[in-house]
Amino acid sequence: MNFNDNPVMQKRLLNIQETAHFLGISVRTIYNQIGRKAKIKFPVKAKRIGRRILFDIRELESYVDSL
């Protein structure tokens, strides 16, 4: 069974590279907008697990739907 064929096995949290690919934007754009001193904040709040920065795909989909 392929990982992508099973909806239960699909990832819910995406890293920055996957998030950039999902939204069609640059990884650098995300890094620039999640920084503490960012003038323009990224519209989806990041989840931090240790040093990992992750984004919930459901929140990303809601954001895209709201555009």
Image (cartoon, rainbow, N blue to C red):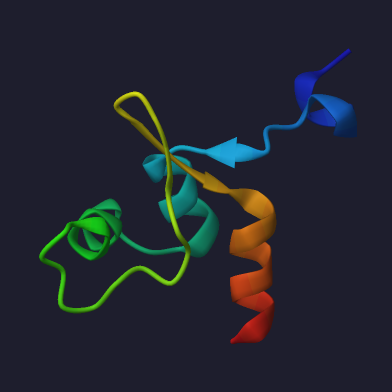
Q: Closer to the camera, 53 or 24? A: 53
Q: Closer to the camera, 26 or 13? A: 13
Residue 22 coordinates in the image, percent (x, y): 54, 55
Furthest-bottom residue in view? 67
Image height check: is 32 above or below 16? below
Image height check: is 17 above or below 25? above
Taking the image as shown, residue 66 lies to the left or right of residue 54, namely right
Image height check: is 29 above or below 52? below
Taking the image as shown, residue 29 lies to the left or right of residue 59, namely left
Furthest-left residue in view? 37
Residue 36 coordinates in the image, percent (x, y): 16, 59
Image height check: is 22 above or below 9? below
Q: Closer to the camera, 60 or 3? A: 60
- The C terminus: image quadrant: bottom right
Q: Closer to the camera, 67 or 4? A: 67
Answer with the quarter of the image where residue 48 lies. Answer: top left
- Please give the name of the residue rendered at 30% of the width and 58% of the height, measured from the top-left corner: 30
- Please give the name of the residue rendered at 25% of the width and 63% of the height, measured from the top-left corner: 29
- Please give the name of the residue rendered at 77% of the width and 20% of the height, measured from the top-left corner: 3
- Please give the name of the residue rendered at 80% of the width and 24% of the height, measured from the top-left corner: 9
Answer with the quarter of the image where residue 1 lies. Answer: top right
| Count of marks placed on residues | 0
Taking the image as shown, residue 59 lies to the left or right of residue 48, namely right
Residue 66 coordinates in the image, percent (x, y): 64, 84
Residue 44 coordinates in the image, percent (x, y): 48, 64
